[in-house]
Amino acid sequence: MTELETIKEAVTASTRDEELASATCYEVEAYVRLWPFVFLVNEWDIWNGSRRALKLQVIRWLENEGEPFDFFQIRTGIGLMGFKDQKAAEKFELRWSVGSSRRPASNGDWNPHPLKSTFEPVHVN
């Protein structure tokens, strides 16, 4: 999970106006008080095509989990995900962070096709 100072640095770096950056950092501080487990989700695979909202599959996954969450998009284009529960936050990070999606598959030869499955016996000619 991202620390408050790291989020504030990202806000400051993406905002040209000092007053706007200061006001946005204040908003972030208030957000972190409401949601104790917060992620900076800019580079995560959760955005829809326009980067204005979450993907529908992410929203459905969050709703199925049943834990309180919040998505906050700052006007500078930065996205924050907040959670009340640490386990829910860790589960979200494991499922949706870009780092987890870039991990190599344990068996790159596996093929889910029903007729060309790796579970199919090998035929030697």
Image (cartoon, grey):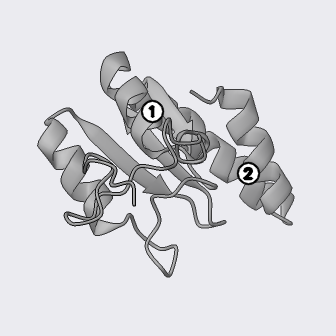
Judge whether 3 appears above or below 120 on screen. above
Q: Quadrant of residue 100?
A: top right
Q: Which residue is mark 1?
A: 94
The quarter in which the N terminus is drawn is top right
Which kind of residue does numbered mark 2 sit on?
Val
Q: Residue at x 44, y 45 (%)?
A: 96
SS assignment at label 1: helix
The numbered mark at residue 11 is: 2
> Residue at coordinates 61% horizontally, 41% vertically from top-left?
99
Residue 72 spot, x, y in % from top left: 45, 53
Q: Position of residue 101 (x, y in %)?
A: 53, 47
In the displayed structure, 44 sits above or below 50; it is: above
Report how many numbered discs are placed on residues in the image. Answer: 2
Q: As drawn, is 97 to the left or to the right of 89?
A: right
Using the image, determine if residue 90 lies above or below residue 51.
above
Query: How far across and down, in percent of the image, does residue 16 sit?
Result: 86, 66
Q: Residues within 10 Å of mark 1 (few under 14, many from 20)?
A: few
Q: Residue shown at 73%/60% (left/top)?
A: 20
Q: Residue shown at 26%/57% (left/top)?
A: 59
